[in-house]
Amino acid sequence: MRLAYTEDQELFRDTVRDFLADRCTGTDVRAAWAADSAISTRWAELAKVGVTGIVVPEEHDGLGMGDEELAAVLVETGYAALPEPLLESAVAVGLLAEFAADAGWLAEIAAGRATASVLLPGRRLAVEAAAADVLVIGLDNGDLHVTDPGACELTAHRSVDRSRKLYTVGFQPTPETLVASGAQRALARASNRGALGAAAQLLGLTRRMLDMTVDYAKQRVQRGVRIGTHQSVQHHLANVLIKLEFARPVVLRAAYSLARDLPSADRDVSMAKIYAGEAADLAARNCLQVHGAIGYTEEHDLQLFMKRAWALGTAWGDAGEHRDRIATDLLGDAPAPSTPSF
């Protein structure tokens, strides 16, 4: 096992990184906060780079790549705090490609002419459901439905990150919307893709907050001295870097396992979500402390990345949910060991 990107994966990742550096600035993210939908003309531009069709099969005009390539790209979308729902679309695409008899949506998504939203068992909110062209819904009994969002009762909910447009979905299943029954395994894999993608984005967010704060510490002068020369500041930022470097291979391992459908995939994905979430949480706290009062203000870009990190920390399962899943995977239904007495 080689926990590193291949040359081709690095090339694609770098292409996406350069595109986002130019087309997804703090100003662009703020515009998504103010808009009714975060989906903009940038979605079609992303399609030209190949991003929207990254996991769309080649026979439907996509790139036909897998979870490793998707994770590499999502790290960069996290770094830029990309408002468009690329992760949610990728999760929906996986289910559409496997089950939808009419796969026309796949080519439309790959071309940047359509977007998809998804709602899986155990999840309460669908991202960009009102603006999506197609909504993929998985039920607790394993049924999979594909429907027009306009046929559902959508209720908007405000996120701490206001570029994430969240909706609860009132949906009445019908035989016409049903595309598969007994799809529990596919739904579980789709949920894993969502958790892995969120972990990858959290890695990118961690790196962005760290980069911003290192630059700030080099420039900010207090009492005639740059604050970056203080050991206390250096230790705060070094602790974030350590967390990031420990989380990175865990996310790469999860992508490797999920791409190959290994038996350890559930556990590996949960580990990735926990490690990446902890890194992003520490980055938000320490970088805010180094910035001081200015970091709290909406005028400063740091808050855009902190709030995205807080939102993704609970998306696709929070740390408690994933720790429980790891415990179940390792221990099964065995009772918790009793505390020894001495």
Image (cartoon, rainbow, N blue to C red):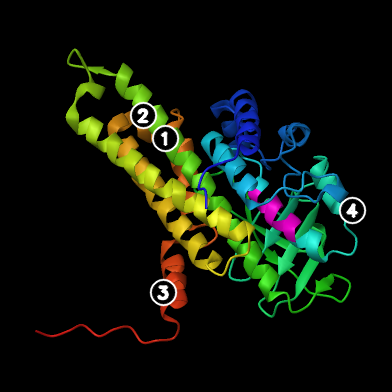
Q: Residue at x 87, y 76 (%)?
A: 175
Contact flag, marks 2 and 1 (Cβ < 8 Å)? yes
Q: Which of the two labelled residues, at mark 2 and mark 4, occupies the earlier sequence position?
A: 4
Residue 22 image position (x, y, % from top left): 62, 23
Numbered disc in front, either 3 or 2: 3
**Type of amino acid at the residue the image marks with label 2:** Thr
Residue 40 image position (x, y, % from top left): 72, 35
Q: Residue at x 77, y 64 (%)?
A: 152
Does the stretch in magenta take in 91? yes
Q: Quadrant of residue 178?
A: bottom right
**Type of amino acid at the residue the image marks with label 4:** Gly
Q: CA distance from mark 3 to mark 4?
A: 41 Å
Q: Which residue is mark 1?
A: 209
Q: Dot 2: few (<14), some (14–19), or many (≥20) neighbours within 10 Å?
A: many
Give the SS element for disc 3: helix
Q: CA distance from mark 2 to mark 1?
A: 6 Å
Q: Which residue is mark 2?
A: 213
In the image, which disc is placed on residue 327? 3
Q: Which of the two labelled residues, at mark 3 and mark 2, occupies the earlier sequence position?
A: 2
Tell me if I can see residue 158 in this picture.
no
Q: Which residue is mark 4?
A: 104
Q: Residue at x 35, y 26 (%)?
A: 214
Nearer to me, 8 or 22: 8
326 is higher (above) or lower (below) than 76: below
Magenta-tinted stretch:
87-94
Nearer to me, 39 or 263: 263
Q: CA distance from mark 2 to mark 4?
A: 45 Å
Q: CA distance from mark 3 to mark 2?
A: 36 Å
Give the SS element for disc 4: helix
**Type of amino acid at the residue the image marks with label 1:** Met
